[in-house]
Amino acid sequence: MRDPDFLNAIIENVGALVVVLNHEGRIHRFNSACEKLSGFTFDEVVGKFLWDTVLPAESAQTIRQEAFEFVTKNPQVSVSQYTNHWRTKSGELRLIEWTNTLLRDAEGHTEFMISIGMDITERKQMEENLRKSEERLHMAVSAVNDGIWDWNPMTHECYLSPRWKEILGYTDEELPNNDSSFFTRLHPDDRAAVDQAVTNHLVHHLPYHVETRLRHKDGSYRWILSRGQVVHDENGQPVRMVGSITDISDRKQAEENLRALNEELESRVKHRTAELTEARDQAERASRAKSEFLSRMSHELRTPMNAILGFSHLLEFQDLPSKQLAYVQEIHRAGDYLLDLINELLDLARIEAGKMSILLQAVEVNHAVSTAIEIVRPLCGKRQIRLINRCDEPGSVLADPTRLRQILVNLLSNAIKYNRQEGSIEVACQRMEKNLLRLSVTDTGRGIPIDKQIDLFKPFERLGAELTEVEGTGIGLAISKQVAELMGAKLGFISEPEKGSTFWIDLSLAPPKTQSDVLPLQRKKAQTIHHNHLVLYIEDNAANLRVVEAMFQHMPHLKLISAPRGEFGLELARRYKPDIILLDIHLPGIDGYAVLETLKNDPITCDIPVFALSADAMTVDIERGLRAGFVKYLTKPVKMNVLQDAIGSYLNGTNLSA
């Protein structure tokens, strides 16, 4: 049956690409599937050569020769297959697989070629992707050097890759592909771990990741990391597991070596820590012993110094012959020198122990310099040294006022002591970069030898001056430098032998403040006491008591009563209610702190101001005393003007700093 309508219906609805070419290669039929794929309508291509329409230009001639002319001119061929690309109207390339059938006339000449094609572009792409994926998988497996396994737990069928077997020392032919190759070589102690890992994976959906030991062909056990994933059927039932194994024996050995090394290191660290702890404890014990020694020595030295300086100072007020007065002044001068030495040693100990307290505040420069100059000026007269103050800086610096005065006095004192007779000293101020102010002290002395300058700031190093008549300990400069650094300042010097030296300190300028914020360095004047007042002094040392009693003879408006023990002092305090109580710390019976606590807890005596007057002069002692409740802490030996000023400040309602 050759019903044209029937044939047309088949061609249009067959779903495949149908192209009919005449004997020249011109398009005779072009079904709707071709129109849809190519984007060309039948009217656009009918009568045109196939290679001039949908074939890529670069391959059109080749396809014409191979797929059309060769076939149509070969009488032996009636059916052929060919695969080529079509270029759609939009420019897209599609890969088509053709089956070509030739219709010939009675003489065998080709009348038509009927080509039925399938678009295999996606299939070819999938095949290419699969090929590349398999290549990547093969390369990845080869790169990681893993063995592959595929196991059916129900049938015990198992595929073991050649690399899997190679890891255990076998060739592919030496081990059968079943699960016995695995389980018979599994270390007995690891069977439970494998079973649990499989159960957790299949039942609880946990990752299958287990480390086991498998017996090698040589009899040794190799550590193996096994990883796997279950495969389910269309009903969601597990049918097999696939995975890989990795030889981790070297890693396990490294871990064991590391564990052993860590244990050894921990042991060493514990041992070293114990040594360091013991060394630290020894250092702390040594530091405590040193502090206790210094505290005790300070106390023991200050107690007799109180009598030496106190009585020598009082004797200077007596009408003594000039020769005897000179003796007394020499005693007083030597006592002051010894006290300075004690104070310097304590300062050095405080710095080394990190207990030197520094209180930075704005200090007016001119007051700081002029105050220090006034302190040392009497020393200049003895050697006829001219002291010139060229410091006229109106600003302020950040410093601890007491410590800055200590540094300046030390620099000026050295400039006087090591100067030549009738020499000169110049004090100057200079603004520096980075918001700094330099205070300098320049002398006309013999200077410092170059080979000895490196030792200048070492404690107790006097650079040969110990062989001269110049007094000193070699501590002052060492303390000054360290105190300067604690204040954030810098102390340095320039010296030229036989021409003199310049010592300088660089201080940070303080930000501008109101006048009330600036605390100038100035000595406090002694307070004048206008009324009769009663002072109780609790002291067990008879010499110290006599010194204070003698001082009070020069304070006619004060009456002193005394007690040698704390218990007796408490009775006198309750009976007479003195205006001020002076209290020693180390007393027989109850000590000064117990007396202070009793006074504070007694309604009769709780309002009486109590001053500590003690030879315990360490910073920790002073801080403890002030925390305990002493309104003022005075250290022995105490000077009469200091004692008078302290008492007057409270009796007249002025609270001077401790």
Image (cartoon, rainbow, N blue to C red):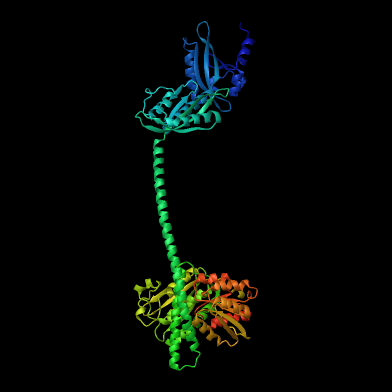
Q: Quadrant of the N terminus?
A: top right
**Residue 343 visible in the shown view:** no
Q: With 211 as the anchor, is 584 left or right in this view?
A: right
User: Between 430 and 46, which is closer to the camera in this rendering?
Assistant: 430
- Relative to 608, is 545 on the left or the right? left
Where 359 falls versus 8 (above or below)?
Answer: below
**Which is more toward the observer, 365 or 130?**
365
Residue at (45, 23) in percent of width and height: 158
Circle count: 0
- Kindly indicate the quadrant of the structure image that contains residue 653: bottom right
Residue 249: percent from left, percent from top: 40, 35
Does the image show residue 122?
Answer: yes
Vertical order, 279 against 39 (above or below): below
Residue at 44% of width from left, 64% of height from top? 285
Quadrant (top left/top right/bottom left/bottom right) for the C terminus: bottom right
Query: Splitting the image into 4 quarters, where does residue 259 fall?
Result: top left
Q: Which of 159 and 94 is in front in this view?
A: 159
**Whole-percent x, y for residue 527 in the image:** 59, 83
Name the spot of residue 631 as percent of width and height, x first. 59, 74
Tell me residue 392's x, y (percent): 53, 79
Residue in the foreground of this view, choosing between 159 and 267: 267
